[in-house]
Image (tube, grey):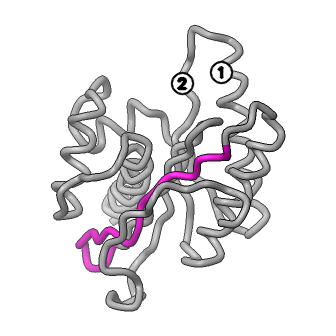
Amino acid sequence: MSSTSSSEPHAGPGLSQVSRDGRLILGLDPGSRCTGYGLVLERSGILTLIETGTIRPRGTNDLSQRLGEIFQGVSVVIQKYQPLAAAVEDIFVARNTASALKLGQARGAVLTACARHGLPVHPYEPTLIKKSLVGAGRAGKEQVAFMVGQLLGVKPDWGKDSSDALGAAICHLNQQRLGRLQCT
């Protein structure tokens, strides 16, 4: 990501070592200073971590520049992995209006990158993601990270934004599976 500073991505086995006959989902946790992303492959009910990381715009105070770097960073991930869909953590109600607006704008950059590449987007409330993973909608970030690691069979050694993004991807896969079960 040439214009974007990104933390070192944490890779799973990668697509070269995993058959691509499953469903690859991109999870995204938007933020104006740090946007988490995570790619989860589901094949025959087995979840596999493909990659997770963060997109951190360079230390500029120019919001439009940061949003452009978020858009570019998400675009690079989409082009590299070509997921089937994106699961995006929805905006929660914040006490600070300015922070909520910036978060909404970062979410807009993420959604625009997905739309630009024809990627279907599925928004999920943070409480639904937590309930889907932990069983409680008010679970703490440590609980979410622990369950994400358990479900993916790896030790979570990534940041909270990456855990949240992976959680969104897993939540989407769970919701899709539940929807298929209800139709039968």
Q: Residue furthest front?
A: 59
- Position of 122 relative to 128 (above/below): below
- Give the labeled residue for mark 2: 92
Q: Position of residue 161 (x, y in %)?
A: 44, 42
Q: Amino acid at mark 2?
A: Phe
Label drawn at residue 172: none
Residue at position x 59%, y 68% from top? Answer: 77
Magenta region's main secondary structure? Answer: strand
**Residue density around tag 1, few if under 14, some if 14–19, many if 20 or more, within 10 Å:** some
Asked if the residue under mark 2 is in contact with the one under mark 1, i.e. CB atoms within 8 Å, the reply is no
Q: Reply yes or no: does residue 50 show up in magenta.
A: yes
Q: Would you name the residue on which mark 1 appears?
A: 100
Question: x, y percentage for residue 130?
Answer: 32, 36
Q: Magenta span covers which residues?
A: 42-58
Vertical relation: 61 (above or below) 163: above
Residue 117 vs residue 73, the one in the foreground: 73
Indicate the position of residue 26 as horizontal and vertical percent values.
50, 62
Q: Quadrant of residue 85?
A: bottom right
Instruction: Indicate which label's residue lies in the foreground, 1 or 2.
Output: 1
Comes first in the chain, label 1 or label 2 = 2
